[in-house]
Amino acid sequence: YRWTIENAALHVGAGGLANMYFKVNGRYYYAQSYQFKAGGPDYDLAFNVFDVTSLPDVSKVKEVARIRLPELPGGVHEMFAYKHSDGRALMVTTTVSPDAYIWDLAKVVSGDVAHAVVGKVANPNTSVAGARSWHDFYVGYNPAAHRDELWAGGTGGCFVFDITHTDAPALLASMTSPGVVACHTFVPTPDSHYALAMPLPTYQYSPVRVFDIKPAFDGPSKAVNHSLGAWAVKWNGAPHNFEMRWPYAFISAQDDGIQIVNMMDPTNPSTVAFYNTREGPELGGENLGGPIGNGGGIYDGGWGVDIRNSDGLIVASDFNSGFWVLRMEGFDGWNGHDWGMPNNSSAQDWDSGPDGAPKVAKAISSVTH
């Protein structure tokens, strides 16, 4: 199946960015976000949604929603779809404002867009220079604390919010590190004890930092101002994105492809496997600050990574060499219970909800004859 936006050549900006797969009321959907600039069409387009339930039969795939934010033109950079503990399918997106929007996806696909935003999470750091904004999200359930947690990176640092009640998000913890004025990627362990973080903007010489979050949850201070440990494949490898499947962190490094790191000792993470997807010379030289995919700048090579829990399949993207499907010896699937952890990750159980959450009774509709 292929879809291209109308008058594609007239558009200005990054175009299609984040994408998410979700399930609502027994049907499967694909959401795609956009960031277009002024000077071309669809400057206010945030994301659209396709019903893909019929796949692999593409004849019935169709667009069911196109979401615009005319009050906040500039689109959506990142989004994260999540099965909330109350049973709703939600999606958290950035906006070109200090607020992240929480969308009720059942309302989105039913056409009730006017009531689809069920929460807004403001970046709490008002001391930063320039505009406050968000970059990346992870949402997960903390069964020990009985709450849904939003892990958000943006200007001012990394932040954790309680979004059990989406209309009243509450700040739980904030993480900063000396010299890091913003947070790019922020992913916790399944038990919400530790988290990996990257600074924003990502820079070639940054390690992946490991934070111990539990003291902020348990103690009087909600701020963590130093990292517990750090990891880097080499001093100039440019780590970018990561996925957590405890005890492994799967890290895409732009000069070093896919790196798999053992997190058992969070003070001393160690590489256990790798596969270099990038061709050509090392990052560096005059093009270091160049545009994305320029064949030599920092934004080149390995970009994203994801894991299929059912069989351990690893997929990765690379600006130069394309799409990769990988296997790690001995890793044939992931379930958190096998490691004494909650079975929660970025992969969602759209039917049953997050592991450890109280089960929500299904509503029974009555029909009057």
Image: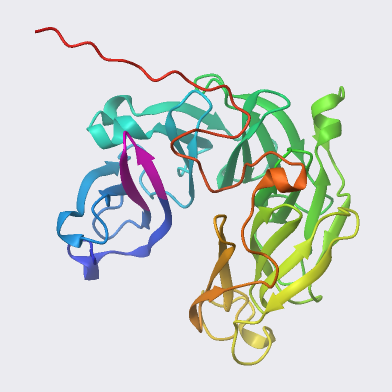
Which quadrant of the figure contains the C terminus? top left
Please state which of residues 64 and 360 is positioned toward the viewer in this rendering. Answer: 360
Residue at the image position 30 percent from the left and 52 percent from the top: 43
Dividing the picture into quadrants, the one containing residue 221 is top right
Q: Per the image, is 30 magenta? A: yes
Q: Residue at x 73, y 41 (%)?
A: 341
Q: Nearer the viewer, residue 326 or 44?
A: 326
Give residue 216's position: percent from left, percent from top: 82, 31
Depicted 201 relative to depicted 134: above or below: below
Where in the figure is residue 6, as x and y percent of width and height? 18, 61
For the N terminus, the quadrant is bottom left
Query: Image height check: is 117 above or below 235?
Result: above
The residue closer to the viewer here, 228 or 25, is 25
Instruction: Give percent across and percent down for residue 192.
Output: 73, 38
Tell me where residue 303 appears, x and y as whole percent: 57, 69
Q: Can residue 180 be seen in the rendering of this structure?
A: yes
Left or right: where does residue 325 sit relative to residue 42? Answer: right
Work out whether 49 lies above or below 306: above
Whether residue 123 is situated above or below residue 324 in the rendered picture? above
Which colour style is shown? rainbow
Looking at the rendering, the stretch of residues picked out in magenta corresponds to: 21-32
Residue furthest toward the bottom? 280
In the drawing, does residue 273 fall left or right of residue 82?
Answer: right
Q: Residue at x 56, y 61 (%)?
A: 311
Q: Main secondary structure of the magenta part?
A: strand
Q: Quadrant of residue 64?
A: top left
- One can see residue 46 in this view: no
**Residue, far top:** 368
- Extreme left residue here? 369
